[in-house]
Amino acid sequence: MDDHLREALGKLLDVYDARRRADVEREQKAKDEEARFLSDFAVVRRDVIRQMGGFKVTADYCADDFVLGNETFKLGKTVVLSHHAIDHIVINLSLMASLKHQVRWMKSTRFSRPKGHFGTALTFSMPFGFLGLVAGLLFGHPLCGVALLAWAIASREALSIAVGRMVVRDPSWFNLVLLYPVRDLMGFFFWAASYMGSKILWRGRVFQLLPGGKMRAAK
């Protein structure tokens, strides 16, 4: 065999081997990510995953956890919320990244469950407390307005104590209880921001959310 032909054949085999190794590594990485996906938030029976068509049914969705639970329910299976409180850490490196992340969550919920998301506005307390304060001042009833705001703050702090201390048993609940009214107000602004457009930033890329919760690369 000619030396040049032997060299060319050797290069082709090297390229083939490199591509084959890359395919194997991608497949293993996908399996690892799938395993982490399950361990992060849920445990799902293997036969249920197979019945719904595999994890590919969640591939185009932003809220893949919601879709997985919803598809499980559609199959007539039981979805159970764990009574265990799972600890977590904030992964965002900056305040702005954290704010954008929370707006993305809200936008995802808006497209996945539009009616329920619209009703989420009623679950916030602080906006209505400030609305009551402004109304009381405008109509000459300042004490009534202050009382409404105080009630809004007290209800948020009571909820914070009930959840932080009695449910999740957070050891730092006492230090954080005063921040919850602020977080409640921030949540309302995140909710309002979810109606400002359909684009989100996800893993460094811009995507557009579609009705039903699917997403595609933004043009």
Image: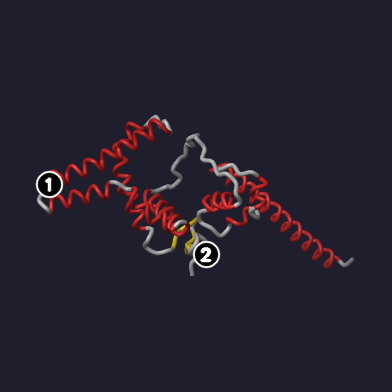
Mark 2 crowd level (few <14, some 14–19, many ≥20, 10 Å Cα): some
Q: Give coordinates of residue 215: x percent, y percent.
A: 51, 62
Q: Is residue 143 left or right of residue 91?
A: left
Counting the numbered discs, the total is 2
Left or right placement of residue 112 versus residue 126 in this view: right
Look at mark 2 in the image and give the residue it sits on: 216
The structure residue drawn at horizontal position 49% and vertical position 37%, both measured from the top left corner, is 86
Q: Nearer the viewer, residue 163 or 86?
A: 163
Question: Does residue 10 appear left or right of residue 123 in this picture?
Answer: right
Say which residue appears at 59% left-offset and 42% top-offset. Answer: 43
Q: Secondary structure at mark 2?
A: strand
Q: Position of residue 73 (x, y in %)?
A: 56, 49
What is the distance, in whole Å, between disc 1 and disc 2 at their CAs? 50 Å
Q: Amino acid at mark 1?
A: Pro
| Identity, as a three-letter code, of the amino acid under mark 2 | Arg
The image quadrant of residue 154 is: top left
Which residue is labeled 1 in the image?
Answer: 142
Identify the residue shown where x is 60% and y is 57%: 57
Viewer-closest of 56 and 9:
56
Local secondary structure at mark 1: helix
Disc 1 residue crowd, few under 14, some 14–19, many 20+, Cα 10 Å: some
